[in-house]
Image: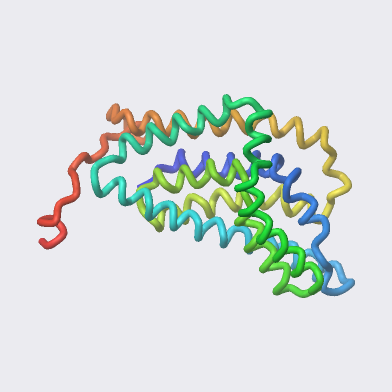
Amino acid sequence: MMFNVELLSALAIGFFGSFHCVGMCGPIALALPVPTSDNLSFIAGRVLYNVGRVITYSFLGAVFGFIGSRFYIYGFQQFLSIGLGAAILITILTPRSLKTRITQSEIVRKISSPIKNSIGKLFSHASFSSMFLIGLLNGLLPCGFVYVGLAGSIASGDAITGASFMIVFGFGTIPAMLAVSIFGKYFSLKIRNKINRAVPALAAMLAIIFILRGLNLGIPYLSPGLSQQPFSTEEMCE
């Protein structure tokens, strides 16, 4: 099971990472259709959009948590945890120019274009259901900080805990994304840049937690002893 320090990391990365994501998803949040002219419906629509994102994150977390559980069954949890931590650190240290080339690559465009086209079609329907669906699809768009969260889901070791990790991550993104959709004109680039500086440090913190867990140092909560019993068909049939 996951420890509270990891859930706190998921919440912190979701919160601070969302200021970076505002630059990518902010235009979608700002352009959301308005079902009716009253303020309550306006806010309700934005809330549904964010609920949709969190539901998609939780589904992805469950899938990646299940994938991570396969590593745990076969006794590779230490290697997985260390590998994920190292991958996050490498990503943090990768030059921005290289990251930009990756995000603008042909394969990324092929993945994101159908999602963006579907979102565009939903904008013509000013309804609560369309905003919820926009949120669901928005959660599938390529995003580096979502991938950091999914790394935590893989390391969690099971589908339920992986989903929980991404739900907490998703809730961390809601304040900024909800605020930009309602008070967008007050969300200046200068403010986002100041808060965004904390994101690499938080991602590095999560990476270090993964590495320490994988090292199996026997430190309670931080680097507990991990079971190394491999999966066997005999145990399964008992």
Is residue 96 left or right of 161 when viewed as pictured? Answer: right
Tell me: residue 90, above or below residue 25.
Answer: above
Where is 118 relative to 1, above or below? Answer: below
Most extreme residue toward the front is 106
Residue drawn at (68%, 56%), measured in percent from left and top? 113
33, above or below 70, in the image: below
Q: Is residue 64 left or right of residue 139?
A: left
Quadrant containing the C terminus in the rendered view: bottom left
Residue 93 in the image: x percent, y percent?
57, 24
The front one of 10 and 111 is 111
Q: How many marks?
A: 0
Locate residue 115 relative to residue 156 in the image: left or right.
right
* Residue ID at (48%, 54%): 61
Q: Is residue 25 left or right of residue 228?
A: right
Residue at point 80%, 71% (across, down)? 41
Report x, y in % for residue 161. 41, 53
> Residue 101: x percent and y percent?
66, 35
**Type of colouring:** rainbow
Residue 62, quarter of the rendered image: bottom left
Is residue 153 in view? yes
Query: Residue at (60%, 30%) from the top-left corner?
Result: 200
Taking the image as drawn, is residue 51 in sight?
no
- Which quadrant of the figure has residue 48? bottom right
